[in-house]
Amino acid sequence: MPIIESFGPSSDAPSPMPGSGRSAAARKFPVLSAPSLEWNEEVARSTARLYERIKHVVPSVEWPFFAPYVRAINDLKRERSAVILAHNYQTPEIYNCVADFVGDSLQLAREATKVKADVIVQCGVHFMAETAKILNPDKVVLIPDRNAGCSLASSITGDDIRLLRERFPGVPVVTYVNTSADVKAESDICCTSSNALHVVESLGTERVIFLPDEYLAKYVASQTKVKIIAWKGHCEVHQRFTADELRRYRDDYPSVQIIAHPECPPDVLAEADFIGSTAHMIDFVRTKRPRRVVMVTECSMADNVRVEVPDVEFVQPCNLCPHMKRITLPKILDSLLTMQDEVVVDPLVAEKARRAVERMIHLKS
Ligand code: SF4
């Protein structure tokens, strides 16, 4: 079923993040002084087990820089009663060495509801930290770099949704979690790339407004009889892949399995052997164990999966997300020392946004 109409933003460029401030809760925590970041035998010994995990993807020459930060961050997490949530696109030393929970947006949103800690450090982009705050209004949520944005999230505003509702009265709005709290607050239900089709079909309507990723909307439209009204937002990482590039991988590596994220353009998806969310792509590699694979998504994910399956050969296009890459070990350490930047969401907006996120989380599979 084709998309019936697409509306769009004037630009895919991320806009500055909404304000963050220091809540009374965050002010309870004293600013701590920086620990020693010296590389020595003791640090080498205490972090050796962690390096063993990532030695296939992090050169040994880099570990003396990372290890003192890894140790300091893990110590500080205990002191602050903090947990670190890391998205699949984080670099291997973050994902494997300091994160308590890893996953895609849906997995992190679910973990965020269960954490017992006082503080959540979100190693991902701003909308993910907002989602963690929406689901944990009483916890302090920190993001190590408040400028970690997202071209999809910044492609649409709450005002855009209000205008679409005027144009399509009564049509429910399904919003991808890659959106700001304001946008979630104007939506009926959220979805991720793992559950988008299920969410759309769960509403039982002939039409839905599906925002903001146009390519994910097209992919969902190809799988359902529900008519999709889409928005022209794009992920600046996935939209860079081309069908020609994938055909070249197939020519150069005849036995390769090509697995792609549905945020890619339709002609790219047409070249793939498997299409799925980051969680589904990881499951594919874990269970099918292809001899050789290309993951058509953000580059760091292949490094993180390779840690688990060293027997699989990854042919690696390197499209990096500049926003995800703003998060680094030094910034995570600084965030825990200073309790900045705290993510603050207006309580009324948060309450409305929570309804849309929880409706997705509680949807029966
Ligand atoms: S990879 Fe794409 S969707 Fe994910 S944060 Fe970066 S720009 Fe946004």
Image (tube, rainbow, N blue to C red):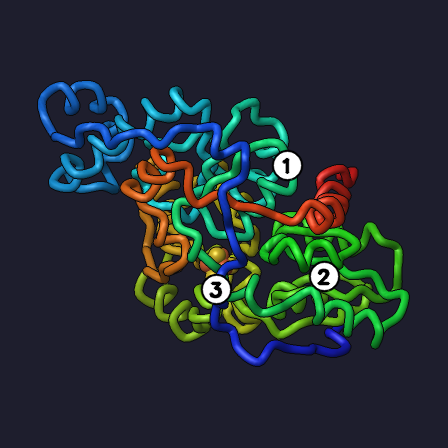
As helix, strand or loop, the secondary structure at mark 3 comes to loop
Q: Kindly tell me whether residue 285 is visible in this rendering.
A: no
Amino acid type, residue under disc 3 in the picture: Pro
* Quadrant housing residue 148: bottom left
Q: Distance between the residues labelled 2 and 3?
A: 35 Å
* Quadrant housing residue 6: bottom right
Amino acid type, residue under disc 1 in the picture: Pro
Q: Give the vertical position of 255 relative to 120 (above or below).
A: below
Q: Where is residue 360 in the image (x, y as percent from the top left)?
A: 73, 44
Q: Position of residue 290 (x, y in %)?
A: 42, 45
Q: Position of residue 275 (x, y in %)?
A: 56, 56
Which residue shows up at 31% across the image and 45% down it? 328
- Residue located beneath label 2 in the image: 223
Seen in the image, is 276 located left or right of residue 16?
A: right
Name the foreground residue: 110 vs 35: 35
Which residue shows up at 76% across the image and 37% down it? 362
Amino acid type, residue under disc 2 in the picture: Gln
Counting residues from the start of the chain, the first of labels 2 and 3 encountered is: 3
Q: Give the vertical position of 222 relative to 64 (above or below).
A: below
Q: Where is residue 316 in the image (x, y as percent from the top left)?
A: 32, 56
Q: Kindly tell me whether residue 77 is visible in this rendering.
A: yes
| Count of numbered labels shown in the rendering | 3
Q: Which mark is residue 302?
A: none
Q: Distance between the residues labelled 3 and 1?
A: 23 Å
- Residue located beneath label 1 in the image: 137
As helix, strand or loop, the secondary structure at mark 2 comes to loop
**Could you tell me which quadrant the N terminus lies in?**
bottom right
Q: Residue 16 carries which label?
A: 3
Residue mark closest to the camera, 1 vs 2: 1
As helix, strand or loop, the secondary structure at mark 1 comes to loop
